[in-house]
Amino acid sequence: MNAERVVAVDAKPNRRNELNELSDLDEWIELHELVSRSAKWLELSAAVPEQHTAAVVADRFDLITWRDTYEQSSGLRDLAEELSERHDYANDLLADAFLAAYKLAPRLRERERMSPSRWVNHEVITSLVASPEFAELRRETCGDPYAAAMAVLAQAAALRRMLEHCREVRERAEQASDARQAVERAAKTVAEALGRAAEEADDGAVPAVPAGAVHQAISAAEAAEAAARQSIQDAVQSLAPAIPGIRSGVRAAVAKATAAVREEASLMRAWGVGSGELERMPFGQRALLAERLRAGRLSQWAELIGRFRQMADGERARKVENAGGELVGVTLGSDLSRVIPSELANLGLPQLRAVFAARYAAGELMLYDSQGEQTTGRGAVIACVDTSHSMYEAGPGGITREAWAKACALALLDQARHARRDFVGILFSAADKVRVFRFPAGEPAGIDRILDFAETFLGGGTSLQRPLTTAGELLEEEFNDAARARGDIVMITDDACAVTEEWMRGWNDTKHRLGFRVFGVAIGPPPAPETASVLDALCDNLRSVEDLTDVHAAADLFRVI
């Protein structure tokens, strides 16, 4: 050994000797060798790959929407509590299912970036988004938190079955997740051991004891990595056979959710609740409304109510502006109020004006032809609906007389609002049983008020005098307050009871003074020809309805009212 090396060794004999005495070893390890062996674990401990717990990529606004919806929906909270009792991470699955239905363009993470403990969740959501039925569901739920929550609740039974079916898979995935975490902890242990070794290093060399601790930590990390690799492989292998069952279960769940969401949307539309109104409605209020519509007395007749409203809408479209009655074709004449547009176009050409004048003089202009109906009124539309015991009677299709009458009245409410006319619903039975529901044209027709009108049933006998007297008083009040005449009264009943002569004289006087019209709808078999009908005497226009599945029996009402 040369002199320089001797000096170097003699300059630091004490520290190495002291450490060798403590460790009973005289072997020192170069620090750079330990660093080289530990590099893999140092990198892992410094930047642990993020293991996501959510399959659907969401921003903070999406998450706020989910949390708000979850807080407002007792159904979601109850479902989450139930599933969480038997299955870990059920809340994450519900959040993913909600966001997949709610987001405009849901994007899923790769399974490799997910925590293994959520692999089952990931497969469920992947199958959900990939199912052909999911696109149909999203037409109803996209951007609508309430509808998305409803879709999740409709899939509850299927989610429950899938989680039970995948219990073993989830247990293995959980083991894989634990094993992966063990690798991360082992990597940190290597980094800590190397840090302590570096502190003990002398002139680039590490004593045997801290160096041995680093080697032990590395060996433990390698063993943990091997165990994690095997555990992940086992989890992947156990997941593969479960995928077909998950996919079939998801398809059935999506189909059920689509049907449920569409059914409620159809129910809302049938009752006249538009999508814009629903979007502005608070979650709790919308849930209560949906429950009330499903549980109400007339909930089973929502389809009938919807058909009535569609029919009335179509009949309004058949009206011709400035032409009285029903449009039936084209005829010839000289009535300038009914000239068709192509004839009027001749006036725009100087060379054809003389032709127009000659045809006008000869009565040969082409005109809209209408027949059999009067001009529409301007005063209030009043529907008098019989709610006596006999209205419980059901006709074809199981539809009750009450359901048909209420559906017709609700369509008349739409008719009045479309024409900016007040609407009044009068429910009656016996002389002492009358309920009046007023819907002024200048105020919103609240759905709660509409439901109160539709669901009220008085029972008892039938008296026509009382509701008609009330209707006449309301029209007279309107005439005195707003100078509006020409109101319309629609009497819907299945029982033509008698009226007194004195009342009849007063009724005719009121009718003549105010200029209103009375339309009658007699529900049930018509009376015998030889029997005098009180409704015939009371009404300007009377029709009979026997087939309660036919909404077109009253179609003409919506062309003249």
Image: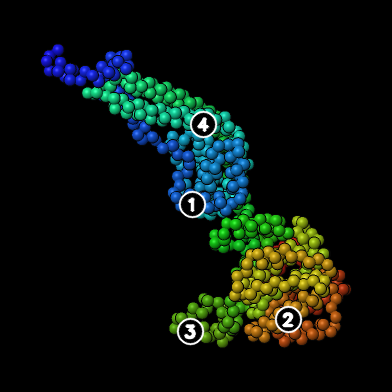
Q: Please give the label number shown on residue 410.
A: none
Contact between marks 1 and 2 (CB within 8 A): the answer is no
Helix, strand, or loop for circle 1?
helix
Give the mark, 4 or 3, whose residue is nearer the N terminus: 4
Mark 1 surroundings within 10 Å by alpha-carbon count, few (fewer than 14), some (14 through 19), many (20 or more) = few
Q: Secondary structure at mark 3?
A: helix
Relative to 179, is 479 on the left or the right? right
Label 2: state its secondary structure. Answer: helix
Real-space Cα distance between discs 2 and 4? 76 Å
Residue receiving disc 2: 473
Q: Disc 3 residue type? A: Arg
Which residue is at a point 72% across and 63% down the rendered structure image?
Answer: 455
Q: Earlier in the sequence, mark 1 or mark 3?
A: 1
Query: On screen, 177 above or below 203?
Result: below
Would residue 505 be visible to someone looking at this image?
A: yes
Q: CA distance from mark 1 to mark 2?
A: 54 Å
Amino acid type of the residue tagged 2 in the rendering: Glu
Query: Element at badge 4?
Result: helix
Mark 3, residue position: 353
* Lower position in the chain sequence, tag 1 or tag 2: 1
Q: Quadrant of residue 438?
A: bottom right
Q: Report the disc number at residue 64.
A: 1
